Image (spheres, rainbow, N blue to C red):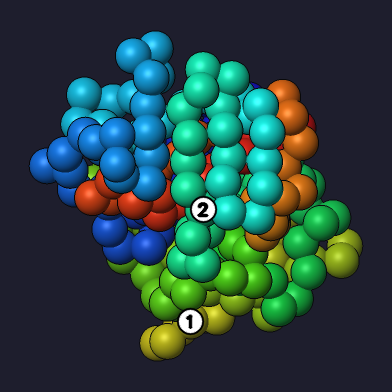
Amino acid sequence: MARIALALIGATLISCGGAVPANVSAPSPTASATASPTVSASATGDRIEGTVATASATKLVLTDNTSLDVGPSTRIVRTDRATITDLKPGMFVAVTAKQQPDATLLASMVNVFPASSNVPAGQRPLPQGDLMTNAPIVSVDQVGSSSFTVTFPGGTAKVVLAPGAVITKQTDVKAQDIAAGTRIVALLRGGAVQSIQIQGE
């Protein structure tokens, strides 16, 4: 599940059209993330993984004593497994798929974004040859239960789930509602906590 959560962070960054800069400097002790020597972080200091010890509306403290200051702009999202039955018209999704000769999208991954998402609707190719489609669902197949239709500026597409396709749903979470023992991945930019991803079921 940890691999799914990390993959989804990458997918979300792609779908948002950006990524955390590689030249972000490691946070200093006076920055919003104060890390102990045992912090699990990337070489550039832009990602911190750990387990929550205590949580309040403005701060998370991890079991290794890392302190993460949570500000008004920090997005905290929980990602859980979902199924086609969880998909409803009006939901905004990010679909990773291969376009078929009949113009349908054969999806390997569908991620339902939370209400706080500001991702613009649209389509664009991904480096590995897939197509990323960010769009609201307009209808769900009620018969075969394996497809749905999305609409975006310039078009409409039918999405068919490939065998083994992964469907996940993101939900906004308040910092104070994070339980002790919860695994998280925090993304930083310039030492400030931009987002926190909670590992779901």
Q: Residue at x 56, y 46 (%)?
A: 59
Image spot of residue 184 (x, y percent): 57, 33
Identify the disc placed on residue 152: 1
Residue ranking furthest to the front: 30
Left-right relation of 4 to 194? right
Image spot of residue 101 (x, y percent): 42, 59
Left-right relation of 48 to 139? left
Front in this rendered view, residue 115 or 159: 115
Q: Give the foreground label among 2 and 1.
A: 2
Q: Residue at x 71, y 50 (%)?
A: 176
Secondary structure at badge 1 equals strand
Front in this rendered view, residue 149 or 11: 11
| Amino acid found under the numbered disc labelled 1 | Phe
Number of other residues with Cα within 10 Å of mark 1, as a class: few under 14, some 14 to 19, many 20 or more: some
Image spot of residue 189 (x, y percent): 28, 50
| Amino acid found under the numbered disc labelled 2 | Val
Q: Is residue 133 visible?
A: yes
